[in-house]
Amino acid sequence: DSSHLCSRKAHVAFQFHPSSLNLRCVLTSSLVMAAAPDAVKKRGPSSTLLFLVFLGYIVVRAVDRVFMKRATNSMQSPTYNLMLWNVIYPISRQVVQVGFWLPYILIMRQAGDRRYTWRFLFP
């Protein structure tokens, strides 16, 4: 209801600019009525895309666990297992994560969002 929005905006305008109350009320109501259909649209990922990303994550984690189990079973020395899972594997996971995040940062920068820089990778 534009009259309700106009009166609420007029009240805010009255607190700051009492001399231009009527002009602001008219401009506000026309802007609200013109922008109302666009304001209803919701932007964001669709539920299908979210489901596919979640499913991809589950599959990657399952393959990761199978690899870990097979690699652990194939090594004879506990020292090799210790080095692999406590030193090599965590570092390689970080390298892979950066490989996923850098294209995302570049895509967001090309889309015009300047909040994404190399500092986005820091905790």
Image: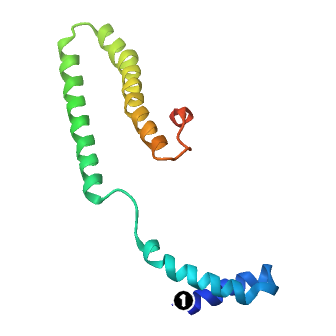
Q: Residue furthest bottom?
A: 3
Q: In the image, residue 82 lies at what x, y percent?
A: 35, 14
Q: Quadrant of residue 44?
A: bottom left
Judging depth in this view, the residue of 29 and 9 nearest the camera is 29
> What residue would you read off at disc 1?
2
Q: Is residue 26 above or below residue 16?
A: below
Q: In the image, residue 6 lies at what x, y percent?
A: 62, 88
Q: In the image, residue 28 lies at what x, y percent?
A: 62, 81
The residue carrying pointer 1 sits among few (fewer than 14), some (14 to 19) or many (20 or more) residues within 10 Å by Cα, namely: some
> Taking 53 as reference, is 114 left or right?
right
Color scheme of the displayed model: rainbow
Identify which amino acid the numbered label 1 is placed on.
Answer: Ser
Judging depth in this view, the residue of 94 and 105 nearest the camera is 105
State the residue at coordinates (21%, 24%). 67
State the residue at coordinates (52%, 41%). 116
Q: In the image, residue 60 lies at what x, y percent?
A: 24, 35
Q: Is residue 82 above or below residue 40?
A: above
State the residue at coordinates (55%, 44%). 114
